[in-house]
Image (cartoon, helix red, strand yellow):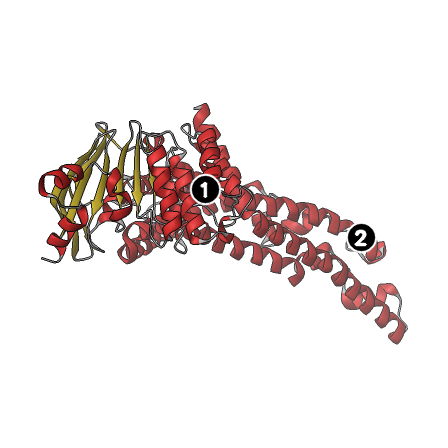
């Protein structure tokens, strides 16, 4: 067990080292764009308020009636904050493909070395999965720190009287994206991560199917992906299907979703293990 | 003993291996020969569980290959399989991290013999030097069996001589060795057994020295008879 953990940690650290430049870039871009957003968005508001007061010779109160008070939600809804999140999600999605395919790229295939390591091959799978998750949580952690600092910056730029009084948590709670990706609501956060983890397990399985059976594997993989999506969304349609016979509580639907996600996840792990041990081709 | 038993392999509709069986004993250097595309690399990949076979089995000392056995058998493919941005030292450290059988002293000896600089990055090395690093990473493992795929592919004559010298020094003892090569002249004197492949099957299996002594034929002579009619 100790040896197992040691090699798993080694592999994870190795993969982490390989993602580090990409991850630092994502983190840097996120912080930079966020910072621009924390400064530019409130300053534009302050500028518009001042300009309106000067040109129309009105009081701040009248200007607020015209433009509304400023809340941190205005900042979180701006492109400066949404773009890095989108970039992070799409970047890590692409990296999830790259993290496997790079091993087979070019003539000098590192897949040889990885598959010949005297460690269970599923450790390769887990280390790649862990690294994607470390990257996700690093981005989330940096986003939380960034938002906390950003809130202070915004509060310093916009006069107190012009602020709506909305707290950071309130602003994030009503935000359709941040309420899911940040641990603001434990329900949404755990749901998003549960769905995300299942998605990653299915994606890795599809990749391994393709690496094992080539084009035929890609076809099987796509079919597998479609089936898992249908299974995953099934609970959402269940109340409509049986509405005349049975009324589902939300908790029942939630329990069903958890069971189905677990089944999909475990199935994907078992298929991946079989493929890595018996079918993968160099 | 490595026992390859009745393995069949197909790529699409093309049958590459059609019931190949042979054994590799410890303390024996065997060479798998055949024209391009005859399935030599596929056999090595199949032994190392790097490609699945349709039928048949491979056992190492009676056991099916499981990851722990990679401490017992090493494979040196014909291309560099370390990360190009790694230095030679980093590649050796990587091996040291995972393989119980990594012999750091031997690695240092081979490094010195090949006059390689441990701080050089693999991507900056010539093809010959990359092949040397590949050999170093394989031969520095204290394994019982070594498989080598085309160790002389695209390598100049002086490097070949160096590699042959390393073979003589490090392939001895009780290891079982299986090599595939077109450059048979360079290692013919080292060989115990030659396995000739043709049309997905073992065409002939013979002892190189015995063939020389009894029939006066070199391995190349036998190959010429088989492949050119």
Is any atom of residue A264 visible in this view? no
Secondary-structure class at tag 1: loop
Viewer-side residue, B127 vs A209: B127
Residue with the mark numbered 2: A155
Whole-percent x, y for residue A185 in the image = 59, 43
Name the image quarter holding residue B98: top left
User: Which residue is pictured at 68% across the width and 58% down the height?
Assistant: A33
Residue A265: percent from the left, percent from the top?
38, 41
Residue B202 visible in this rendered orientation of the protein: yes
The span from disc 2 to disc 1 (Cα, nearest Å) is 65 Å
Q: Residues within 10 Å of mark 1 (few under 14, many from 20)?
A: some
Residue B136 position in % (x across, y down): 42, 39
Secondary element at image label 2: helix
**Label 2 marks which chain's residue?**
A
Q: Is residue A273 above or below residue B227?
A: above
- Point out the image quarter for the N terminus of chain A: top left
Please determine whether, in this image, residue A118 is positioned above or below residue A232: above
Q: Position of residue A128 (x, y in %)?
A: 46, 43
How many numbered tags mark residues here?
2
Q: Which mark is residue B114?
A: 1
Q: Is residue A27 above or below residue A14?
A: below
Residue at position x 13%, y 46% in the image: B217
């Amino acid at each position: 067990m100790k040896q197992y953990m040691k090699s798993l940690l080694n592999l994870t650290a190795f993969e982490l080292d390989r993602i580090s430049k990409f991850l630092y870039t994502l983190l840097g871009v996120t912080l930079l764009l966020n910072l621009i957003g924390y400064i530019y968005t409130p300053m534009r508001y302050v500028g518009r308020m001042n300009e309106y007061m000067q040109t129309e010779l009105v009081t701040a109160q009248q200007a607020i009636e015209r433009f509304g008070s400023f809340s941190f939600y205005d900042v979180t809804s701006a492109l400066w904050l949404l773009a890095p999140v989108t970039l992070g999600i799409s970047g890590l999605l692409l990296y999830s493909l790259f993290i496997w395919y790079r091993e087979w790229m070019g003539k000098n295939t590192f897949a040889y070395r990885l598959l010949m390591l005297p460690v269970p091959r599923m450790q390769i799978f887990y280390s790649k999965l862990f690294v994607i998750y470390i990257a996700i949580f690093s981005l989330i952690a940096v986003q939380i720190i960034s938002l906390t600092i950003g809130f202070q910056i915004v509060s310093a730029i916009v006069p107190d009287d012009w602020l709506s009084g909305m707290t950071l948590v309130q602003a994030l709670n009503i935000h359709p994206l941040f309420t899911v990706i940040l641990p603001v609501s434990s329900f949404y956060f755990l749901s998003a991560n549960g769905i995300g983890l299942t998605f990653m397990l299915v994606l890795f399985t599809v990749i391994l199917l393709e690496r094992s059976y080539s084009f035929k594997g890609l076809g099987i993989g796509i079919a597998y992906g479609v089936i898992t999506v249908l299974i995953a969304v099934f609970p959402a349609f269940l109340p409509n299907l049986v509405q005349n016979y049975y009324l589902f509580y939300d908790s029942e639907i939630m329990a069903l979703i958890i069971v189905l996600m677990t089944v999909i996840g475990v199935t994907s792990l078992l298929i991946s293990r079989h493929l890595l041990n018996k079918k993968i081709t160099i | 003993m490595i026992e390859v038993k009745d393995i069949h392999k197909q790529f699409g509709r093309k049958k590459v291996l059609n019931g190949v069986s042979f054994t590799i004993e410890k303390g024996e250097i065997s060479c798998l020969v055949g024209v391009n595309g005859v399935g030599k690399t596929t056999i090595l990949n199949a032994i190392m569980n790097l490609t699945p076979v349709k039928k048949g089995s491979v056992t190492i000392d009676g056991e099916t290959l499981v990851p722990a056995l990679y401490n017992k058998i090493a494979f040196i493919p014909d291309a560099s399989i370390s990360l190009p941005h790694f230095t030679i030292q980093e590649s050796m450290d990587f091996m040291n991290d995972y393989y119980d059988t990594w012999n750091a002293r031997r690695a240092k000896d081979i490094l010195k013999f090949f006059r390689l600089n441990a701080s050089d990055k693999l991507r900056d090395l010539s093809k010959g030097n990359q092949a040397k690093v590949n050999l170093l990473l394989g031969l520095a493992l204290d394994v019982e069996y070594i498989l080598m795929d085309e160790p002389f592919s695209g390598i100049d004559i002086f490097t070949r001589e160096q590699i042959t010298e390393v073979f003589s020094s490090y392939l001895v003892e009780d290891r079982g060795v299986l090599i595939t090569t077109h450059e048979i002249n360079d290692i013919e004197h080292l060989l115990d057994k030659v396995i000739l492949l043709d049309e997905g099957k073992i065409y002939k299996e013979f002892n190189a020295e015995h063939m020389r002594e009894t029939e006066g034929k070199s391995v190349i002579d036998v190959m010429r008879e088989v492949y050119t009619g």
